[in-house]
Amino acid sequence: MVLGILKEQSFENRVSVTPEIAAALLKMGFEKILVEEKAGENAGFPDEAYKEVGAVVATGDDIFKKSNLITTIHFLAGDQVKKLSEGQIILGQFNPLANKEVAEKLNGAKATAFSLDMLPRTTRAQAMDVLSSMATVAGYKAVLIAATQAPGFFPMFMTAAGTIKPAKVLIIGAGVAGLQAIATAKRLGAVVEAFDVRTAAKEEVLSLGARFVEVEGAQENAAAGGYAVEQSEDYKRKQAEAVHEHAKQADVIICTAQIPGRQAPVIVQKATVETMKPGSVIVDLAASTGGNCAVTENGKTIYHQGVCVIGDSNLPSTLPRDASSMFSKNILNFLKLLSPKGELQLNFDDDIIAATCIAHQGAVVSERLKAVLGKA
């Protein structure tokens, strides 16, 4: 089997497969690996690094013409989907729950597609979980950006000129990104509080040395696979009041709360932003799905009444070397399941393969996506 590695679009610095993982795939039994020219350059992996491990540098057209299986991070740009041939396999992170036309286009091309953000949240799938890997990167970098943007120190300082109080950081959402943000902010010396609708998150927050902001009455659903679910209007009102009180005292807010396939819940209201201290910073990682902050603008840094609001859902691209290494290892672990010894095995009785398959022979396989598309 021939595997092709595409160069990402201009906004993305990562690459889906690094030279190290390309070498591992060749040892695993893949016949040949083609990598598009300069695919890894922005991540610190020049073409020569791929050649050294036995991969072949090729044009983008060659990737589509000669590969049985193609890896990418984001969905194909422009009319690239028309270059897919029937039965060709494409693997990446396509967010089909939010971008429903993705599955339609792939099925129209009669391609077979696997989207790793559709993985079930099981122990067996953890080694392939790109959402967790990239959330780790985003949570870490969000705090560093906030620390750079903030007008004061994060840690407490006792100096001859007096004592500097530590920064107060509020983390919205205590999933993987939120927990990494907590850990990073604590390492920098800040006083950290965290809010999450899931009661299971409380123990993890406390274990990292942060205070848990608890609001009673949250709805939880075991079928959501560990993700947050939509809340009642009464809960949202109590939540807004609690967040408002804690946000007024915060120097930094990191927003990470998202619901798969839905708009991000607005947790930091406009009125709350307007009560925050001038110079405060909000970094909203949910910007691409509307944002947890009411004034967030995706892809932009704005100032609202003296508060800096940074909307960025693609922070992993700002740490491309290590983010690519993590994403690439997730790809390797999935291919060990999908293509052991370099030979394709489409076993749809396997819950991981079935859950991630969003296109095959003109139809959606993933039951979760079928439900969203109304095709269950």
Image (tube, helix red, strand yellow):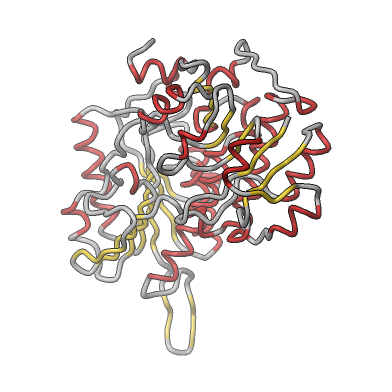
The quarter of the rendered structure image containing the N terminus is top right
Residue 235 shown left or right of residue 100 in the figure: left
**Which residue corresponds to the image point at 22% horizontal and 69% vertical from the top-left?**
306
Query: Residue 352 appears at what percent x and percent y?
Result: 59, 21
- Quarter-wise, where is residue 329 in the image? top right
Report the residue that reaches farthest toward the right: 27
**Which residue corresponds to the image point at 32% horizontal and 42% vertical from the top-left?**
289
The one nearer the camera, 340 or 218, is 340
The one nearer the camera, 162 or 293, is 293
The answer to whether residue 327 is seen in the rendering is no
The one nearer the camera, 335 or 206, is 335
On screen, residue 303 above or below 81: below
Query: Residue 145 appears at what percent x and percent y?
Result: 44, 64
On screen, residue 126 above or below 352: below
The answer to whether residue 189 is seen in the rendering is yes
On screen, residue 199 above or below 186: above
Residue 112 shown left or right of residue 246 in the figure: right
The quarter of the rendered structure image containing the C terminus is top left
Count numbered badges in the picture: 0
- Quarter-wise, where is residue 276 in the image? bottom left
Query: Residue 372 appears at what percent x and percent y?
Result: 35, 20
Residue 149 shown left or right of residue 352 in the figure: left
Query: Residue 74 appears at what percent x and percent y?
Result: 49, 42
